[in-house]
Amino acid sequence: MLSNYLPILIFLIIAAGLALVLLVLGTGIGRHFARFHDDRAKLSPYECGFDAFEDSRTKFDVRYYLVAILFIVFDLEIAFLFPWAVALGKIGLAGLIAMSIFLAILVVGFIYEWKKGALEWD
C-alpha cells in the first residue's frame, strides 16, 4: 500500500529541493547585484519622464473591484458555457436545467451589482 505513494514522496522531495535551490540562488544573485542599485538613473522616474502626480499607494474606488469581480463572473460563465454547449446532446434535460440554474444565479448577481450602482462611473 505504501509503495503506491512512493512516486508522490519522490515528487515532493524533488520539488522541495528545487525550491530550496532556487531560493538560495536568488538570494545569492540578489546580494551580488545589490551594489548596482545605487545608480541614480535607476532611481529616477521612468516611463513618462516626470514625477508622479500623487502617491502610488492611493486606494482605488470600490467600484473598480466590483467591475473586476463582475468581469471574472461573466468570464467564468463563458468558460462553462462552451463545454456545456458541446455536450448538450449527451447531458439532456438534466444538463439544461443545471445550466439554467447556474445562469439564473449569475443573473441575480449581475442585477445586484447593477442595483448597487457598481456599473455607474460618476
Image (tube, rainbow, N blue to C red):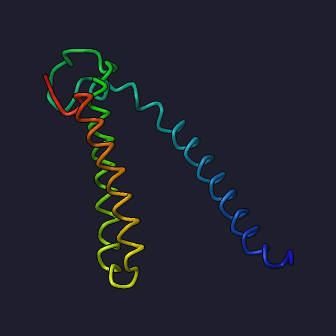
Q: Quick one: 87 or 37, which is closer to the camera?
A: 87
Q: Is residue 8 above or below residue 51?
A: below
Q: Quick one: 119 or 44, which is closer to the camera?
A: 119
Residue 85: x, y in percent? 29, 75
Q: Quick one: 81 or 41, which is closer to the camera?
A: 81
The structure residue drawn at horizontal position 26% and vertical position 27%, both measured from the top left corner, is: 41
The structure residue drawn at horizontal position 42% and vertical position 73%, both measured from the top left corner, is: 94
Residue 117: x, y in percent? 22, 28
**Quarter of the image holding residue 89?**
bottom left
Give the residue at the far bottom of this rendering. 90
Question: In screen coordinates, is 10 left or right of 33?
Answer: right
The structure residue drawn at horizontal position 60% and vertical position 47%, both measured from the top left corner, is: 23
The structure residue drawn at horizontal position 19% and vertical position 34%, both measured from the top left corner, is: 119
Q: Is residue 2 above or below residue 68?
A: below
Residue 40: x, y in percent? 30, 23
Question: In screen coordinates, is 122 left or right of 95?
Answer: left
Quadrant (top left, top right, bottom left, bottom right) of the N terminus: bottom right
Numbered marks: total? 0
Residue 42: x, y in percent? 30, 29
Give the residue at the far top of this rendering. 54
Quadrant (top left, top right, bottom left, bottom right) of the C terminus: top left
**Quarter of the image holding residue 65?**
top left
Q: Quick one: 48 or 115, which is closer to the camera?
A: 115
